[in-house]
Each structure stands twice: as structure tokens, then as C-alpha cells.
Amino acid sequence: MFSNEYVKQRMAKAEKLKEAGINPYGHYAKRNTKIADFLEKNKDIYELENKRDETKKFIVAGRVKFLRLMGKAAFFKIEDESGILQVYMSKNDLGDKFNLLKKTLEVGDIVEVEGYPFVTKTGELSIHADDVKILTKAIHPLPEKFHGLQDVETKYRQRYLDMIMNKETREKFKLRSKIISLIREFFLSKGFLEVETPMLHTIVGGANARPFMTHHNALDIDMNLRIAPELFLKRLIVGGFEAVFELNRNFRNEGIDHTHNPEFTMIEFYWAYHTMEDLMELTKELFDFLFEKLNLPKKLQYGDMIIDFDDWSTITYKDALVKIGKVPEEILDDIEAMKKYLKDAGVEIEEHIDSKGKLWAELFDEFVESKLINPTFVTEFPIDISPLARRSEKNPEFAERFELFIAGREIANGFNELNDPLDQYERFKAQLEAKAKGDEEGMDMDYDYIRALQYGMPPTAGEGIGIDRLVMLLTNSHSIKDVILFPTMKPKKENKED
């Protein structure tokens, strides 16, 4: 790690600074102005006759991104979070320190510059340095500026380097932060209470997913990282809160692809005395709010698609299979016929998938989901793939549930909550039977949750929205790794020369 020749050369320069009595990893920065503020405060310099104002003094700091050394002078550019600024320094102003900087200053170093504003002959507002101080010596060289950081895997593994080299990356994550703040603002404005529930669970529940297992030594019990906060949030509804939300991480021990990461961010919210139809309207309001605050067009470009956010639609699960997926309606009640249809289409299914609802889900994933481009609510889900949703009174085979699809992927999942403790108990038992048959995503029996329902949960609707996928959509990003600062990656064997 320290044997690379370029690293050795830079380490030698760090030693030169030490020999000169300068700590190359100092601490006491005196910056008093961000670069964007410097540029804004000195716009009027262009109007002055000599285009400089030596009476104004500023201290700025940032990373050196460009360096051009000349005999007794040098130009370099520094970048902080707010912008880029050109610096001019000369031997006349810095004396012997100029010679030391000329020998030790390199692209990548973090420096502090004190000086006054002026405009160069080429018309660029810059800072004329009275003093330059190396705050941090970078001993690993940055990628060559012309080509930049091109390797995608390196961008994900070394996000810090991606952010140093690519302003667009920094801007995307600023936007992600803004989106999350706006979502929080929206729900607070609607009277929802933000809460925090446990990340470590003793029971696998809240969604159908394979958990990450761990062990608590002091209690000597197995625990799992939560796959969803749902059952705890609904306990709060039982307890008397009528509108709650949690915006936090979930963990699912599943495959990694362009829309899945083992740890991901979701918002889940529960609303007593409301229905799934109310949630669908609330979701539309949320999108309208985000588009307004982010100044986004309602016809949004996503890859080669144009998504019309003025064109929302609703379709039942069965109609989606038949009308959009072109699945023959006559096979939808025949388990063997559905298995054959999937097999003929080259879809492999696991042995434990043998119920009507689970086969419908396989058909939906294969033939429908990718075709749902404009915002589409899919309703009337089979009850056996909706273990926590209220059963439809019109047709008990179906749940009062919806999912929202945009750009060919699921964005949200919501339903009228099941508040019948006997029905919930039977659903949990069915989940245990599925686990016994090999379904690794089945839930455990949660006796305490059944007990909570016995005390009475008011009619409630709840929904979860995937924040990472939403950010992907609003930033035109096509891999979840592009919107997660540090995505999960398989460890790479370190090369000591890197």
C-alpha cells in the first residue's frame, strides 16, 4: 500500500515539509470564506479599472485539482464543496516559501490560501495569494484528469475517490439528501409522527424476505436484522398513535442487482381510520409535492422512457396478467397449467412455489412488471402472497392491497391492515408451513403481535416506499449503486501496490 513508486515520491515530499517545520497533516485551518461565497462577493471586481481589490482579504481552502508551475509563479485551482477557484502565487509574494511549495505542492493536496481578489488577463476571477499553506499532503495520486475516474467498480468501492473526481456524483447525493428531507417534511405536514423502532429483531416478520441472522452474546439469543419495521409500527397504532412513519434502513439477505442492495432505505407509514384508497391519493400528493419542490417536469425522462406523471392508472392483478402480460385467462385457476406456461417460457421456479397466488406472482414478474411504465397502481393481490393485508370482503381470495409500479419496477406497497387476530394467527401458521416446505422468505409466528391485535387495532392503512428506487427514478440513475453512497460489494483482495 505504501510501496507504489508514486506514493513513495509523495511521501518524500511530505518529509521535506516536516524538515521545513511544516506538519503535512496539520489541523488548525483558518478558512473564513467558501469558494462560492468568494466568487459571489467579488463579482464587482470586473467593474474596477485595474480589476483587483487589495483591500479585501479572504482565506479559502480546498483540494488542488489543477497545477501549472512556471519559473517564479504558478497557477493552480482548488475545489471545496461549493465550487472551484483559481489561485495565483509568486515568489515575489511568498519569498522562500514559494520554492518549498514548488517542490512539494501537487494535485490532490488540500491547501489554505490567503489573499485578495483579482481578474486574470484571460478574464477569470481568481485569488492572488499572499500566503499558501499545505493543510494535508495527499500521498496517493489522483487519476489523470483527462480520463478521470472511468472504472465503474472503483467508483463504488472507492466512493471518496469518485466524489473527488466527479462533481456530478456529489450533486446526486446532495439531491438524494434533499429528496429525503422533503419526504420527511411532507409527512410531518400531514400530521404524521416520526418514530424509531428496533433494528434487531428476535422474530422474522414484517415482510417475506430472507433475513441476516446474528447472535446476542449477553442474552444468548439468536437475532436478525430487521427486514421491515411493519409489526412494530402497527403496535404503535394499537397503542394510540394514529399516524406514524419511520424512514430508515431495512436488511434483506438477497441477491444484488441493479435494483437490489442487501441494506436499503424505506419509509413506512401507517394511518388509522383511513383506507388504501386514501394512501393512493396521499402517494400522488407526495409525488406532486416532490416534483414542485424539485422543479421537475411532469413528463420525466428516465433512460429511453418518458414517464408521464399526469397519467396515473389503476388495474387489478388479474387484469394486469391478462391485458398487459397476455397470459391466457383460462390457466389462472389451474396450478399445473401455470407451471407449464412458465416452464415453456423458460422460467425456473422453486419447488415450494405451488399455490395459485405464488404462481400468479411468478407470471406477473415475468410478463407484466417491466411493461408498467407510467405510474400504475396494481390492486387485488392474491391473499396467499399478502400475509399481513386485510382480506377483501367482496372476494376472500384477494387482499385489499396495492403496489405502485413506475418505469417497470415496484416503488411502493400498501394495503388495508389486517386487524383480525384470529385471521392473522392463521396467516402466520401458513407462513410457518411454507417455511417447513423450504420457503426461506417465510415469516415466524409473532405471538406478541397477535396479543397486541387482541387489544384492538383501529381500521388502518399502511404503505412502504423504497427510497433508493425513488431516488433512482428522480435522478435518472439506472443502478441502485449509483444512489447509495457505499453499496454492498464483494470484498476485493487488496494489492499492496495500489
Image (cartoon, rainbow, N blue to C red):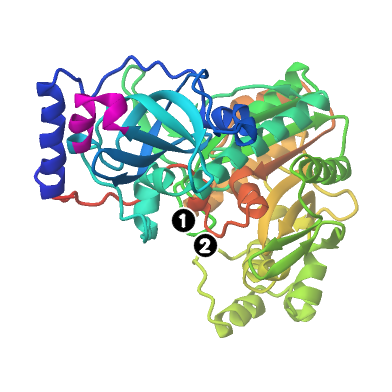
Q: Amino acid at mark 1?
A: Gly
Label 2: state its secondary structure. loop
Assess whether mark 1 and mark 2 are in contact (beta carbons under 8 angstroms): yes
Q: Is residue 438 above or below residue 450?
A: below
Sort mark 2 into few (<14), some (14-19) or many (20+) by Cα contacts within 10 Å: some
| Image point (63%, 77%), residue name | 336
> In front here: 312 or 228?
312
Label 1: state its secondary structure. loop
Q: CA distance from mark 2 to mark 1?
A: 6 Å
Check if residue 101 falls in the magenta segment.
Answer: yes
Q: Return the residue at label 1.
A: 438
Based on the displayed image, in which of its 4 quarters is residue 270 positioned?
A: top right
Based on the displayed image, in which of its 4 quarters is residue 38 positioned?
A: top right
Based on the displayed image, in which of its 4 quarters is residue 43 positioned?
A: top right
| Image point (52%, 62%), residue name | 352
Residue 72 percent location from the top left of the image: 25, 38
Check if residue 382 falls in the magenta segment.
Answer: no
Q: Which residues are magenta?
A: 90-102
Residue 352: numbered disc: 2
Q: Amino acid at mark 2?
A: His
Q: Is residue 144 visible in this depiction of the protein? A: yes
Q: Main secondary structure of the magenta part?
A: helix
Residue 225 percent location from the top left of the image: 46, 34
Quadrant including the N terminus: top left
Q: Is residue 108 above or below residue 341?
A: above
Q: Is residue 276 above or below residue 336?
A: above
> In front here: 73 or 454?
73
Residue 492 placement, left or right of 243: left
